[in-house]
Amino acid sequence: MNKWFLSAELFSLIIIFILMLNFYERRWKGFPKRKIYHFCLLTSAGSILLNILCVYTIDQAWNIPLWVNLLCNSAYFLLIVAVSTIIAYYLMRLLFEHIYQQRQQQIFAGIFLFLYLIFFALILYNLRSGIIFYFDENRSYCRGPLINFGYGIMGIQLAILICITLRNLKSVSLPMRRVMRILPPIILLLTAYQLFYPDVLFNGGIIVAANIILLVNFQSRRIEQDTLTPSGSRKSFHQELTLRLGGHQHFQVVMIAVHTFGSVNHRYGHEKGDNLLYEIAKWLEELHPSAHSFRVGNVEFTLLVPYTGMVASRKLLDTIQKRFSEPWHVDHMSVVLDVSIADLICTDQDWNATDILEFLNFSLSLAKERPDRTIRFDEAVYRKMEQRNQIIKRMQQSVREGLFQVWYQPIYHCSTGKFSMAEALVRMLDPDGNPISPSVFIPLAEQHGLISEISDIVLQNAGRLLAETEPEQLGSVSVNLSMQQFMSASLISDLQALIDRYRFDPGRLKLEMTERVLSGDIPRMHQIMEKLHQMGFRFSLDDFGTGYSNLSAVLDCSFSSIKLDKSLIQGYSDNRRSTFLVNAMLDLFHHMGCQVVAEGVETEAQARALISRGADWIQGFHYARPMPETDFLQFLRLHGADFADR
């Protein structure tokens, strides 16, 4: 009479059910790795239940037909080895997750299947030979000479997994290395316990140990997993790149930036916006058999796939472009998304993960300016990026060493024919003394947090110049404030310190802001402007007509002057529509009590037409170009005013 101890199996069954409850998530179970693990849990639970059933049928051998016992026990042996094979296959998939060796993966999967088929044939042979188990004449369960053959198959599977790990160690992730350090000794230890104590049924414990280790390392939602989508996180993308590069693998990375996604959230709500991001990530994850998607920003995704040639890489880009040109249908909403796409091919270049991220981000900034919004990182893009980096380094050096220059452009007062106002403009030279256009370095300064320091240099120079000149010589100087500087908590105290230091009338310093500022936090902007007005400062709206603001926003702010952007002035006097538009603006702003500065005037015809139409001030190359301070002071002595700009 066989006596079996089932307590370990019953406990293992409870643990398996707990794991299944913990694992089950409706939105995530459909993805390949999780599908396999889900199948591992189901077959594990089935094998433990079947083992418990076999104990019952063996105990009731005289009351149950012999064929039922043979069938149940044969099914159990097949299922327990199937569980081992599925877990081994799952681990093998995880090992090859970071290794682009599809052929090797197929070979090892074939070996696992071949081993299982051998065992399947052995079970069939066992039905008449009893080589694994049999029932004697007393219907007692007896172990055959190959009763432990299944453990041998498990040992071979472990050995194969260890060999794959050691052979591709540089491309094996840290969680996988940890599993391959922990799992084999635990499995061997528990198997040895089962072999020494065969009456204590413990196969379920071995299975549970394997499933727990897999769950903890690969299925739990850690920082490597994006919290909103099935994609990996920015951190896991960096780790993935490091593994690919460490294994000298060839791969393609595609980065996709979704623009104006805030309008989706605003129109449909954040929940539907989140669901849309989820669908995008899901589509990317399923785009390629070996694809791995990552959410590296709020609305930025990357896709990592093996590089198999230019044709395949171009086809992938075309597929992504085509999909994003079509509507996304999610939760009863239909949305066409505006995206920029950049891709990069890595074939053993001397890059690291940080380099690749920088390359992709820079490429995206260029893609936004292209008609098809798509670009591939290549030598030409790399040279542009190097030029940008050199400019950034030069800006940092110029801030540290005081290399920035402040030039002044005189502004012509139409009613008197004198120059009593100027705009302070920052200038930067490269190491060879060649000028770098402000249109190039100012946007970079804004992006890299240098604009406030540069603006402060301009303010300090303008404040000093106002202190050193009389109002009769120089009525006022205009200084442009960036959005970052205008919204800074220290702006008011900084300007007060400027007045205290140089002792000039704050009404002589005109604070210019671009239309971009009007697209920000309007209530806070009004609050700041009111405080600065009380201190005596005046405001001018710069570059009106570039498209950021609307007229109602301008009406709400107390500007003393409005600068019409040069894009409006270029066609003045030559183009009927431009002339009509500028004339209408002159009338409107004059009725609002604002003076109007026409910016970018380059011809005599433009100047005469603007003066005759009532423009208050003219700024442009026709009268004077920006010039260094010494030249500007000399210019004022020759063409300056004998009145204060009030």
Image (tube, grey):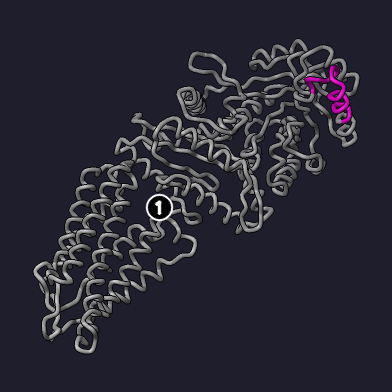
Which residue occupies the extreme top position in the image?
638
Which residue occupies the extreme left position in the image?
145
Q: Tell me where residue 40 appears, x and y as whole percent.
A: 33, 64
Q: Is residue 134 left or right of residue 394?
A: left
Which residue occupies the extreme front position in the image?
128
Q: Is residue 267 visible?
A: yes
Q: Tell me where residue 571 appears, x and y as whole percent.
A: 81, 20
In the displayed structure, 528 sits above or below 363; it is: below
Residue shown at the point (34%, 47%) measured from the top left: 97
Give residue 528's quadrant in the image: top right
Q: Tell me where residue 295 appears, x and y as whole percent.
A: 48, 48
For label 1, the crowd category at 10 Å Cα-Cα, with few meaning under 14, some 14 to 19 and many 20 or more, is some
Q: Main secondary structure of the magenta part?
A: helix
Q: Is residue 417 magenta?
A: no
Image: magenta residue range? 569-584
The residue carrying mark 1 is 224
Along the line of sight, which residue is nearer the eye, 204 or 512? 204
In the displayed structure, 548 sits above or below 619; it is: below
Residue shown at the point (79%, 13%) measured from the top left: 603
Along the line of sight, which residue is nearer the eye, 314 or 259? 314
Residue shown at the point (70%, 24%) measured from the top left: 423
Quadrant location of the N terminus in the rendered image: bottom left
